[in-house]
Image (cartoon, rainbow, N blue to C red):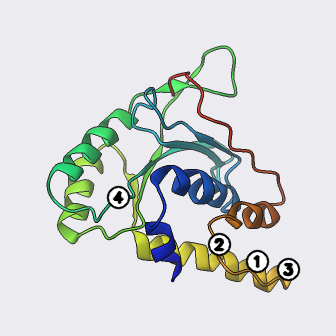
Amino acid sequence: MNIKEKLQSITEDDLRKKVIIPMMYALGCIDVRDTHGPYEKGKDVVYETDHLLRKKVYGAIIIKNTCNISKGRPLDNLYRQAKDVMKEFENPNDLSGSKIKIHELIIITAYKVTPAASNYIFENCGVNFPNLHIIDGNTLESIIRELISEHRTKKKEEYQFNIDTFKDFCERKSGRTISIPEPTIRAY
């Protein structure tokens, strides 16, 4: 079974907790939060990273992992969720209640995104998010393979992708402990 097939065989919860959140840390994010739930305002995951101009960039991830994304009802739900992402949310690292605006949006699935669906997403959501990225199953597999290859080259460590050990791999790659607490009730 290849990486994409393994990713397609798990639930959205497992994809979010065991793969996406650890992967974002391995890609260099400073903070990654699981915000999935009834108060998510469209954001399954929120992350913080540094911009090259030394400013913070906040992004949101929408995860869909049940089937190919094509025209129709799933796409309409995705569009509504993307519209919710635009709403500001409380800064989880600041107790004063300051608000954060999302700068970029990533839509991730382990499945295929049809060209018609991709065009629809960019035409309708890209207006609000000039930094909009769609990661389909092939691209997600490629990102994971690249992370593994970079680590193998740098650390001379062999690693075969496994859903249950990927978080540990990402901890070694990022040099930090990754804890994934349950989402808080706080609306992000």
Circle 4 — which element? loop
**Disc number lying in front (4 or 1):** 4
Circle 1 — which element? helix
Q: Rate crowding at label 3 as few (under 14), some (14 to 19) or many (20 or more) other CA atoms within 10 Å.
A: few
State the residue at coordinates (45%, 76%): 5
The residue where tag 1 is placed is: 151
Q: Earlier in the sequence, mark 2 or mark 3?
A: 3
- Amino acid, disc 2: Asn
Q: Earlier in the sequence, mark 2 or mark 4?
A: 4
Q: Percent position (x, y) of residue 113?
A: 29, 67
- Amino acid, disc 3: Lys
The residue where tag 2 is placed is: 162
The residue where tag 4 is placed is: 66
Cβ atoms under marks 3 and 4 closer than 8 Å: no
Circle 2 — which element? loop
Circle 3 — which element? helix
- Amino acid, disc 4: Thr
Q: Percent position (x, y) of residue 61?
A: 47, 48
Q: CA distance from mark 4 to mark 1?
A: 30 Å
Cβ atoms under marks 3 and 1 closer than 8 Å: yes
Relative height, residue 98 to residue 133 (above, below): above
State the residue at coordinates (67%, 64%): 164
The residue where tag 3 is placed is: 155
Cβ atoms under marks 4 and 1 closer than 8 Å: no
Q: Rate crowding at label 2 as few (under 14), some (14 to 19) or many (20 or more) other CA atoms within 10 Å.
A: some
